[in-house]
Amino acid sequence: MMRLLGSAKRLCNGLTRRDLLHVGGLGLFGLGLGDFFSLKRAQASTLESSPGFGRAKRCILLYLYGSPAQHETFDPKPQAPPEVRGEMGAIQSSLSGVNIGEGLPKTAQLLDRTTIVRSMVHPYPLHGTVYAMSGIPNVDTKIEAKPRHPRQWPFIGSVVDYLAERNGEPTPNVPRNIALPYLLHSKANYFPLAGPYGTFLGTKYDPVWTEFNARGIKVVPNLGGESGSSEHFYDPNGEIDPRERLTISATKFRDGVTPRRLEDRRSLLRQFEQTRALIDRSPRAESYDSQQQLAYSLLTSNNVRTALDVQSEPDRVRQAYGMTLFGQATLAARRLIEAGGRFVTVFWDSWKYNNGSWDTHEYHYPRLKKVLLPGFDAAYSSLIHDLEQRGLLDDTLVLCFSEHGRTPKLNNRPGGGRDHWSRAYSAIFAGGGIAAGRVVGSTDDIAGDVVSTPLSPKDILATAFHQLGIAPDTTVPDRLGRPVPITGTGKLRRELLS
């Protein structure tokens, strides 16, 4: 368990100074002194009896921005009326009596290695990426497109990175917190979305992002674009040229800059920095220095560059993951965790005016059949098989979720469509101590409301932290130094664990 506020100086009564800071800060969340002492007494026995604590050594998060429909993925309702069940049916999985959407045949055959949750629920049918990936208590639409707003809370990968550093873990050969394939929503011709950032922990805990600039080579249905037309466009999640690469700009030398010249420049920079020895070091300066060190390590190390080189994989492996941006990014994620990455995130994101994502208000079935379901099915099934064959699945946590689900009833837009819905949706998890062959929760006859075992996004975060060896009730300091719970109201859910 990690406690990270203040010094560890122990007082005569056995409490530490940081414990007293917890008492003062937790009052903001309705916990008094008596509650605090009770909590402290319960923590030791709780952790000792909790299965799987620290079992996951690393994590891969697959985030499906835009939100898949539960009906066509993990909670089909083949007996529902046509306006609910839609055009696609259900197929039997490797779990007796458990069906999933017909568009996921490869995933269906490995369901016995996973846990499906059919009872995800929260109050906000909005694209709350911050809400899904942090402990923030609610969706705030005014700051959803403001990643640096002071009210934002830190991304789960950023918290993992922060706590590892404060816990004294050695600097890894690969950044602990990496995200692929490009800065979230930066290709959508709108604005970057908040969510995957260090926020009040500092910019040094932002993910290290890869970059991908090539368009796709397959024409796929357009979701309307800014003009509202149904013209087609080239989506990299439909197909990419196998020669296209994911890169990190800091891993490339500019023309004419050799490793020797880079070291000479760094030596001169060190000499210059020595002249500033008496200058006060602000938190911003410390963050800048750490980013310099990270950039230098990326430039001089082959670890990240080699891990991103999916072209070195056998062609059969690459084809299995799918020659799509999501598929090749997922393959790169496996290579990154093999190289020493701790938390790697792969976003299935928009490309040009919100096209390409899972936000299927229209052209729902053309998008699902031609791009979304085949692309996910290939990448996800290959990742699980790959990790299992390499002996990595047992201690690699694989999370796959989104912001919400989609409406039970289809709308009348072109190509069919389902709108936003957060009263019931699905997610899938595997590895790292997650139970194998389990379905958690259930919904009503139209997958519109949860009828058993509701789970919130905060519960998923709490359980993920627990599996990664971080107590879910751990706090981190906000901009004013007050302790903030890393999972908000989230609770460890043992239903998910083996």
Image (cartoon, grey):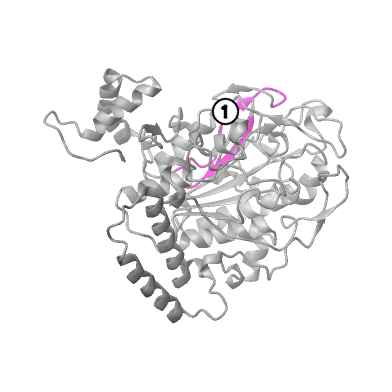
Where residue 63 sits in the image (x, y, percent)?
60, 45
Q: Is residue 402 magenta?
A: no
Residue 246, placed above or below residue 105? below
What's the amino acid at mark 1?
A: Gly
Q: Residues within 10 Å of mark 1 (few under 14, many from 20)?
A: some
Nearer to the camera, 465 or 438:
465
Can you say whether 165 is above or below 265 in the image?
A: above
One can see residue 211 in this view = yes
The residue positioned 62% from the left and 31% from the top of the image is 141
Image quarter of the C terminus: top left
Can residue 436 be found in the magenta stretch? yes
Which residue lies under the disc numbered 1?
441
Left or right: where does residue 27 sit relative to residue 492? left
Of residues 189 and 139, the one drawn nearer to the viewer in this rendering: 189
Residue placed furthest toward the left: 12
Question: Helix, strand or loop at disc 1?
Answer: loop
Residue 161, image x and y in percent? Answer: 41, 49
In percent of width and height, residue 92 lies at: 69, 40
Across the whole image, how many numbered discs are drawn on residues?
Answer: 1
Tell me the quadrant of the picture where the N terminus can be found: top left
Is residue 497 visible in this depiction of the protein?
Answer: no
Highlighted range, magenta? 425-447
Q: Residue at x 86, y 40 (%)?
A: 415
Residue at 52% of width from left, 70% of height from top? 306
Measured from the top left, where is residue 78 in percent x and y? 76, 31
Q: Nearer the viewer, residue 406 or 271?
A: 271
Q: Quadrant of residue 67?
A: top right
